[in-house]
Image: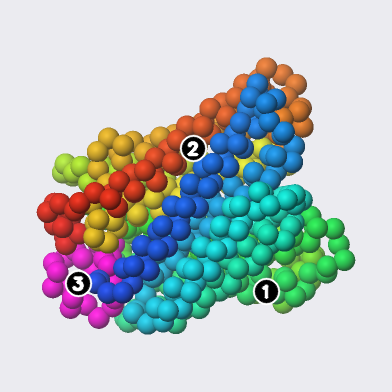
Amino acid sequence: MNSLSHAASSPLALTAASPTSYTLTLPPGPRRSLVLGWLMLGLVALIGAGVYSILLVLSRTPGLNHWLPVADFFRVALVVHVDLSVLVWFVASAGLLWSLASRPILIGCGWWALGLATVGTLLMALAPLFGTATPIMANYIPVLDGGVFLTGLAIFGCATVLLVVRGLIAAPKLGITFDGGGALRFGLNASVISAAVALLAFAASLLLTPTAIDPQTYYEILFWGGGHALQFAWTLLLLVAWLWLASALGARVALSPRLALLLLALALAAVFVTPYAYLAHPVASVEQRDLHTWAMRLGGGVSILPIGLAVVIGLFRRVGPTTSAQLPLRAALIASIVVFAAGGLIGVFISGSNVKIPAHYHGCIVGVTLALMGLVYLLLPQLGFRAPSGRLARWQPTLYGGGQLLHITGLVWSGGYGVQRKVAGAEQVLRSAAEVAGMGLMGLGGLIAIIGGLLFVVVVWQALRAPRTDADQSRSDA
């Protein structure tokens, strides 16, 4: 099996004899340290997001929120939590995968990107400690409208530009092969292209958005187009993770590599609605806003449903025992599919501006996060560390996913009574016992999910510190 890895012309080589195995492996080289650096940044972001999420859940849980300075406190915590758990964690995970898949060139550019991203993350995470700043609850990238936070966000943006530029230049050559590894490499390359389109959209909005408007409207327009385009990048990473994890579990995915590549290409194609929207309509127009929304709704779904079904069928048809190293991967994959599907289903029934909206995007975002967590578990032995195993690793994805299901169920329940989003404490105006019960369920699920998320950090840290065994070596070579 090692001979396949060394003989392949691509930096990521197919590691299974079956032509339908969606599997990639990390070759030796200087990229290993860079991959580890992005992993560490992602862990730091999750720790920070977990701390702020504890404050968030407490501020919205009936009975407990009276002990906290709820209004601005809630919004400040929400801004930092969202940016750490979505923006930084996703970019760090993308940096890990793009660095893993890249050719061994421009390594210095990758390190500059990681260094700047770390500085930007720390400034954003610590900004609430440095004076007051108005929280702006803009979609996709909420901000604290103050010097420290905005400086950190700008530095992090520069880091992302460097990361994406290196990703485009150092992307592996695909050739004309139609195997599972080639499909995954295409998906990773496509996610880099989607991120590049998103950065161009952010730049266009920065140039075209009028500054003589209120801050809420300004940041909403500034991040709307690029924020939608970024969702295509995260969706492509999700689909790559599902296929990769399914193959690692020994599932025979009911999808040929050619069809998988076509579906990934369709997910990529939809992102090019973004530049058309900027050329066809003014940046602040309702027409452009609606075009971004419909492109995301229609574009991603075309690929998610068939690939998800193929993975589920493959899991059901799988035969043979599940090893201890595979149990955390299976838990992460199943939890990812279930939570993402729940979020997508909730989105169909959204009406009005209530807490059904955060229920929808919490489900989708956490679905992506669980898939990325599963990939981290899978890649640790290939990076030279011990494979996560044991009861803690097996239960972590289920605890995190189950907590999030309770969390979004409570939000949907409360949203049916009209409880508004982006508010907390007395501003929620909980009039009935049913509304209080719904938000209480939200709080319980949120606390369980926080524990599950922080346990991921514990499991990975234990794997990084534990000595590697012969079994881990054989799993990384297999």
Task: Find numbered disc 3 in the image and state the secondary structure of the residue it sits on.
Answer: helix
- Quadrant in the picture for residue 475: bottom left
CA separation in Å, label 2 and label 3: 38 Å
Q: Is residue 132 left or right of residue 380?
A: right
- Quadrant in the picture for residue 73: top right
The quadrant of the rendering that contains the C terminus is bottom left
Mark whose residue sits in front, 2 or 3 = 2
Residue 15 in view here: yes
Pinpoint residue 342: horizontal percent, then vertical percent.
51, 40
Task: Find numbered disc 1 in the image and state the secondary structure of the residue it sits on.
Answer: helix
Of the numbered discs 2 and 1, the one sitting upstream in the chain is 1
Task: Find numbered disc 2 in the image and state the secondary structure of the residue it sits on.
Answer: helix
Foreground residue among 314 and 102 = 102
Please tell me the numbered disc located at residue 5: 3
Mark whose residue sits in front, 2 or 1 = 2
Circle 3: residue type: Ser
Q: Is residue 333 left or right of residue 322?
A: right
Q: Is residue 307 magenta?
A: no
Of the numbered discs 1 and 3, the one sitting upstream in the chain is 3
Q: Which residue is mark 2?
A: 450
Foreground residue among 356 and 374 = 374
- Residue farthest toward the right in the current orientation of the protein: 212
The quadrant of the rendering that contains the N terminus is bottom left
Of the numbered discs 2 and 3, the one sitting upstream in the chain is 3
Circle 1: residue type: Ala
Q: Which SS does the magenta portion mostly show?
A: loop
Please tell me the numbered disc located at residue 203: 1
What colouring style does the render use?
A: rainbow
Q: Which residues are magenta?
A: 1-26
Residue at (30% x, 46% y) in the render: 462
Q: How many other residues sit within 10 Å of disc 1, few (<14), some (14-19) or many (≥20)?
A: some
